[in-house]
Amino acid sequence: MIQWLKNIFSSKLDLPPIDLGVLEVDVHSHLIPGIDDGAKDLEDSLQMIRRFAELGYRKLITTPHVMSDFYKNSPETILPGLENVKGRLKQEGISIEIEAAAEYYLDEGLEPLIEKKELLTFGDNHVLFELPFISEPQNFKSVIFELQTQGYKPVLAHPERYGFWYNDFDKYHELHDQGVLLQLNILSLMGHYSPETKKIAERMVKEGIVSLIGSDCHHIHHQELMEIARRTESLHQLIESGRLKNATL
């Protein structure tokens, strides 16, 4: 599978693999076992975390899904899971820092959490949130306003994957200008999600509006694909631009 992908991208993979350790921090992953569609058990978690350490990351901010009707996670499910992972890392002698926030789905459950200030954050009160893939929610602007009013710093997960903006690229600049940090997925730059997503991701890089990059790692196969992405021109450009804020977290 990996060799097949390498053959497809061979004409564009003439760059050496960039050192992902320069990023220092991964800001989007699903490493706590059994609570969302990421790691299935602790061994699964450890396998992925070992690979992050081998890639040079010093810190992981793992972000389980929080959805009102599906992944009904909260600090009560996320934080104990994090402690279990930390305990095993210590036992195994795996030296990497890990903390947990969440990837909040913009549904009817998000605004009450904002009002009650019950969101899991990372860095300087940053909150990672995602949108439905079908259409922009009607309350999208009001949620951003509420987040910022309550002192949170909104981080929009993988905006390059929202097809409803593909014919309205100004939307990305509008969000960037409003202080919303745009978090790109590494695998978007190698076409993992779709050619259209890759095109939008590359344009975001070119126009300098990406603030954070994340693996959005759910399983070890995503990390295998990251090896291919390390050779893409756009990832080189993004990391070498000096615009990314990963290392400040």
Image: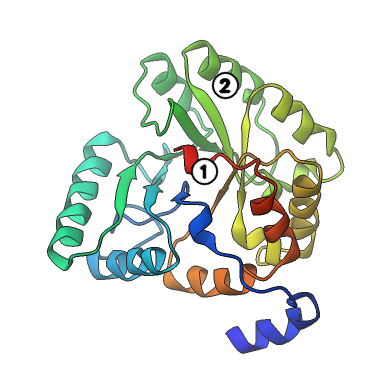
| Total numbered circles | 2
Residue 175 % position (x, y): 71, 28
In the rendered view, tell whether residue 15 sits above or below residue 188: below
Identity of the amino acid at label 1? Answer: Asn
Residue at 39%, 31% (x, y): give it: 121
Of tags 2 and 1, the one toward the viewer is 1
Q: Secondary structure at mark 1?
A: helix
**Residue 143: mark:** 2
Q: Is residue 110 visible?
A: yes
**Quadrant, the C terminus:** top left
Find numbered disc 2 in the image and state the secondary structure of the residue it sits on: helix
Snapshot quadrant of residue 196? bottom right
Q: Say which of 49 and 193 sits in front.
A: 49
Would residue 116 appear left or right of 111 to someone viewing this image? left
Give the side of residue 224 with respect to residue 87, left or right.
right
Asked if the residues shown at circle 2 and circle 1 are in contact, with their CB atoms under 8 angstroms apart, the answer is no
Considering only vertical position in the picture, is 74 above or below 4? above
Q: Tell me where residue 15 sits by quadrant.
A: bottom right
Q: Nearer the viewer, residue 34 or 69?
A: 34
In the image shown, does 121 or 249 lie closer to the viewer? 249
Residue type at mark 2: give it.
Val
Q: Position of residue 173 (x, y in %)?
A: 78, 31
Residue 109 appearing in the image: no
Of 227 and 81, nearer the camera is: 227
Residue 239, compared with residue 146, is above or below; it is below
Residue corresponding to mark 1? 246
Q: In the image as oriented, which residue stretches furthest toward the right?
A: 167
Residue at 47%, 15% in the rendered image: 151
Residue shown at 63%/28% (left/top)? Answer: 180
Is disc 2 surrounded by few (<14), some (14 to 19) or many (20+) residues within 10 Å? some
Mark toward the start of the polypeptide (2 vs 1): 2
